[in-house]
Image (tube, helix red, strand yellow):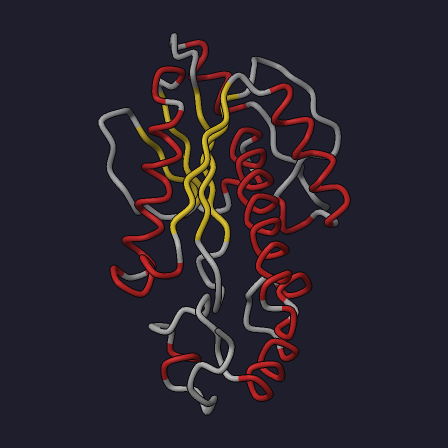
């Protein structure tokens, strides 16, 4: 049975006197193309958001609906977007770390505690805890997962307008069989992560889509 994320951890932190508890999550770390995006979200105490859970478990339509609600109701929302060029230059771990730090920096005056999804990937002066599958346990982290995912999906939809042959509006840059088929047909384009093994060691031709 699916257990929805809740405020259990936030409530304990609020009880201890912390008020700006931010949930953090990222989207796009494993994709073959496009940026990595991180979000930091501070929710008001006991705000009810019907249907909120890990963004990967939601339909695109539901994610879009929740994205609007979260941006309207949250006390603060920060987003960090790090390009595929930086990913190729500095590596995906460093780029993801930079995305998290950028998201936090944008709402630094509203935050006094950080709850991040996943393993420890960055250090910060603020007290920080990392939770494996935090987006399935912690409501503010689930909110951040939705913001990061929808923000990145919208970026890839925009890329689709410029590079329509790849179907970025469908697979969002991830390594699907359809994406692989498009690479077979067209080679890679400028937003593909050329440092990633599937692209760097792939059988595809040199860049033919300017």
Instruction: Give the total number of marks visible in the rendering.
Output: 0
Q: Nearer the viewer, residue 21 or 146?
A: 146
The answer to whether 18 appears left or right of 52 in the picture is: left
- Residue 19, percent across and down? 43, 11
Is 58 left, or right, of 137 in this rendering? right
Q: Residue at x 68, y 30 (%)?
A: 68
Instruction: Please provide percent x and percent y for residue 67.
Output: 65, 34
Give above or below for 45 relative to 182.
above
Q: Residue at x 44, y 9 (%)?
A: 15
Relative to 91, is 54 above or below?
Answer: above
On the image, the x and y values in percent for residue 114 come to: 38, 28
89 to the left or right of 41: left
Q: Residue at x 47, y 37 (%)?
A: 39
Task: Work out whether residue 173 or residue 58 is closer to the camera in this orientation and state it.
Answer: 173
Residue sitting at 74 percent across and 34 percent down?
51
Residue 17 lies in quadrant? top left
Q: Position of residue 144 (x, y in %)?
A: 53, 36
Identify the image quadrant of residue 194: bottom left
Q: Going by the image, does 180 lie left or right of 15?
A: right
Against 177, is 124 above or below? above
Question: Is 152 rendered above or below residue 162?
Answer: above
**Which of 186/193 is in front?**
186
């Amino acid at each position: 049975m699916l257990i929805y994320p809740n405020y259990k951890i936030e409530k304990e932190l609020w009880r201890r006197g912390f008020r700006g508890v931010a949930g953090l999550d990222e989207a796009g770390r494993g994709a073959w193309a496009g940026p990595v995006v991180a979000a930091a979200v501070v929710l008001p105490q006991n705000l009810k958001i019907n249907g909120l859970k890990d963004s990967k478990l939601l339909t695109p339509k539901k994610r879009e609906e929740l994205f609007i609600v979260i941006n309207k109701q949250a006390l603060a929302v920060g987003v960090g977007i790090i390009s595929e060029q930086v990913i190729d230059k500095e590596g995906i771990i460093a780029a993801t770390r930079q995305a998290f730090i950028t998201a936090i920096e944008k709402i630094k005056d509203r935050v006094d505690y950080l709850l991040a999804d996943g393993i420890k990937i960055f250090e910060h002066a603020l007290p920080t805890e990392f939770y494996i599958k935090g987006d399935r346990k912690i409501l503010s982290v689930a909110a951040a997962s939705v913001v990061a995912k929808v923000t990145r999906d919208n970026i890839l939809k925009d890329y689709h307008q410029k590079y329509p042959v790849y179907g970025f509006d469908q697979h969002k840059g991830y390594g699907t069989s359809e994406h692989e088929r498009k690479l077979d047909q067209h080679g890679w384009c400028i937003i593909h992560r050329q440092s990633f093994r599937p692209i760097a060691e792939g059988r595809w031709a040199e860049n033919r889509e300017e």
